[in-house]
Amino acid sequence: MNKKQLPKLQPQVTMMPPSSPQLGLRSNPPPIQEKAKSNKKAPPTKEELRKTTETIMSNYLNNKNVNDAVNSVRDLKPPKHFLSELVSKVVVYSLDRSDEDREHASTFVHTLCTSGLVTGENLLQGILSVVDQCPKLEEEVPLVKSYLAQFAARAIIAELVNMSDLAHHLENGSHFPLFLLCLQQMVKLKDREWLSDLFQQSKINMLKMLPEIDQNKDRMLEILEGKGLSFLFPLMKLEKELLKQIKVDPSPQSIYKWIKDNISPTLHTDKGFVNILMTSFLQYIMYEINPEDDEEQLASPSKEQLDEEKQLLLSFKPVMQKFLHDHVDLQVSALYALQVHCNSKSFPKGMLLRYFVHFYDMEIIEEEAFLSWKEDITQDYPGKGKALFQVNQWLTWLETAEEEESDDEDY
């Protein structure tokens, strides 16, 4: 039987569609490359930074090459948060070494600042960090505060640290007497006049730099005299001595001679000096007419007391005029001294007005000064409100009289 032969099956060819350019496919995709391993060094640990800083300091104090030391810090590339600790490590490392080494350490820190590697804020924080360690450091280095004061003084002199910024962190006797030791070092490194000018510009409240128990003028003057720093407050010493001198000899000639011999001419036009001069006269007059400080007599003085008060004030007139004549601003200061004096006595009835009239009649204080005092707004002197209440009517009369006089001159 003839079998029909089946047709040969052709192998089925599957046609792949041509790659479509719209799909963005490449016929030969590049082989996947492995990321090259980074050769970047890991940043040094805090402990490594500390040890390296010690090594840098050791080498520097041996060879005294400050540029090499600075370059070593630059190569170290310390992170910003470590810079203050770097400064404190440098300071601590040099504390128990010689004066020369401590001076070299200061030079190193100074150069780090001028090179831009360390900021003034880093330096201040570094010094304060060592200050906080003082109680522990004093066990091994008893004079640690004196040595630290040297670093701070040099930093202030080089204008790397602001003196008022340092003072702010040492208020209320914190780490006393570190701030005073720093002032002493500045006197040694510069001179009195330079420090006095800087201190005045900084406007630091010295009372706040003492422990709270010592925050009064008498104790402050005593401490400053003990440290050789009373020259910073020449008027404070005057306040104590001038009244004593007036009691010894109240004649105008004697008082003026004493002022000339003891007070620098540059202070003669200082408002603080005028305030003290006026206060001393007022205190002396008060003592003479009422030695027992009897409040009743003070509130209701007798005719004899009033006459004595006027005569004593008249006797001091030449000295007052010597320093107040043609200085309206100083005359205003004199009025403020009177205001504070009356305030301290709780404003005895009529006292402020009596003195205003005496000052005017005796030509010690001019109309312009009275009116400037009236218009001046300041919180520096207590009792202004009560004072104005007592003399406001008289001041109105004075202002009116001055206006009328001015109108008459126009004709």
Image (spheres, rainbow, N blue to C red):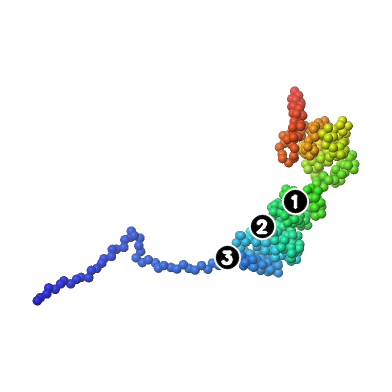
At x 25%, y 67%, the residue is: 14
Is residue 170 at least partly visible in the picture? yes
Percent across and percent down for residue 372 are 74, 34
In depth, the one of 9 and 385 nearer the eye is 385
- The answer to the question of whether label 1 and label 2 lie on touching residues, with beta carbons closer than 8 A, is no
Percent across and percent down for residue 408 are 76, 24
Q: Which residue is mark 2?
A: 125
Q: Secondary structure at mark 1?
A: helix
- The answer to the question of whether label 1 and label 3 lie on touching residues, with beta carbons closer than 8 A, is no
Distance from the alpha carbon under mark 2 to that under mark 3: 23 Å
Q: Earlier in the sequence, mark 1 or mark 3?
A: 3
Mark 1 against mark 3, which lies toward the viewer?
Answer: 1
Numbered circle sitting on residue 117: none
At x 87%, y 42%, the residue is: 246
At x 74%, y 48%, the residue is: 205
In depth, the one of 57 and 229 nearer the eye is 229
Q: Which residue is mark 3?
A: 43
What type is the residue that disc 2 sits on? Answer: Gln
Picture quarter with the C terminus: top right
Numbered circle sitting on residue 212: 1
